[in-house]
Amino acid sequence: MVTIVDYGMGNLGSVKNMLKKIGCPCKVSVTKNDIIQAEKLILPGVGSFDNAVNNLKKLGYFDLIKEKVLVENTPILGVCLGMQLLTKGSDEGVEAGFGFIDAYAHKFIFEPSSKLKSPHMGWNFAKINKTSSLFDSMYEQENRFYFVHSFAVECEDEADILTTTNHGGSFVSAFEKGNIIGAQFHPEKSHKFGMAFLKNFMSLNK
């Protein structure tokens, strides 16, 4: 059973509906016990970095998720802000993230004359940087995903980078390090590409 972590800042309905559509049983966390019993975790997120960290701590989820991921090796998928929370921190705030990945989230900054906008919103391509079961059956096509974000992750270790995307330069649109996965794109809004990605996530460790 996959548990979608509810800390008051995620698009839970869309994630739950997409998992239901692809036939994957899931539940939304109500108590800490839902996280304790989870076989996999999905950490969605919309909003500010510091508020997200503080909400997770108030609910008693922050340290519990750390234990699940680092001690029990539970697979976790962070989506959008959830991906950024898996890193060390963000330009957006002062709180420390989980620190699972040696990475940091930086704000998009463009020249005043640039036609590029922040947030980066809409469909864009994800270039696969390494072999991963998360992209099984997806290597022979250009994979397009839906994005909405003003901050983008930079990884210190290139080995962690799963996909990159271009928006005024290349940024990390997904990372993978063992059981720790982050997606800057929204697989729950990315139609067939998101469905395939989530199916592959749900198949991990089977």
Image (spheres, rainbow, N blue to C red):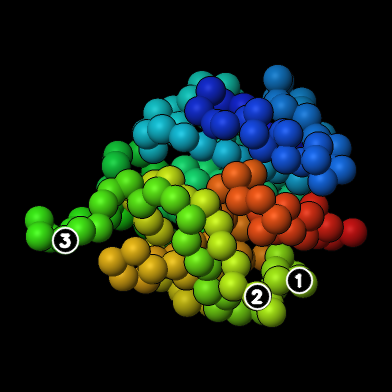
Closest to the observer, 127 or 41: 127
Residue 54 vertical position relative to residue 79 in the rendered view, above or below:
above
Upstream in the sequence, badge 3 or badge 1? 3
What residue does disc 2 label?
A: 141
What residue does disc 1 label?
A: 136
Q: Position of residue 102 (x, y in %)?
A: 45, 63
Upstream in the sequence, badge 2 or badge 3? 3
Closest to the observer, 134 or 167: 167
**SS class, disc 1:** loop
Q: The residue under label 1 is which amino acid type?
A: Asp
**SS class, disc 3:** loop
Residue at x-position 47% and y-position 61%: 124
Q: Is residue 162 visible?
A: no
What residue does disc 3 label?
A: 114
Residue at x-position 60% and y-position 44%: 189
Of marks 1 and 2, the one in the foreground: 2
Residue at x-position 64% and y-position 44%: 188
Upstream in the sequence, badge 1 or badge 2? 1
Q: Residue furthest left?
A: 112
Q: Position of residue 168 (x, y in %)?
A: 28, 66
Residue at x-position 89% and y-position 59%: 206
Q: Position of residue 174 (x, y in %)?
A: 54, 62
Q: CA distance from mark 1 to mark 2?
A: 11 Å
Q: Is residue 190 visible?
A: yes
Badge 2 density bin: few <14, some 14–19, many ≥20, Cα 10 Å: few
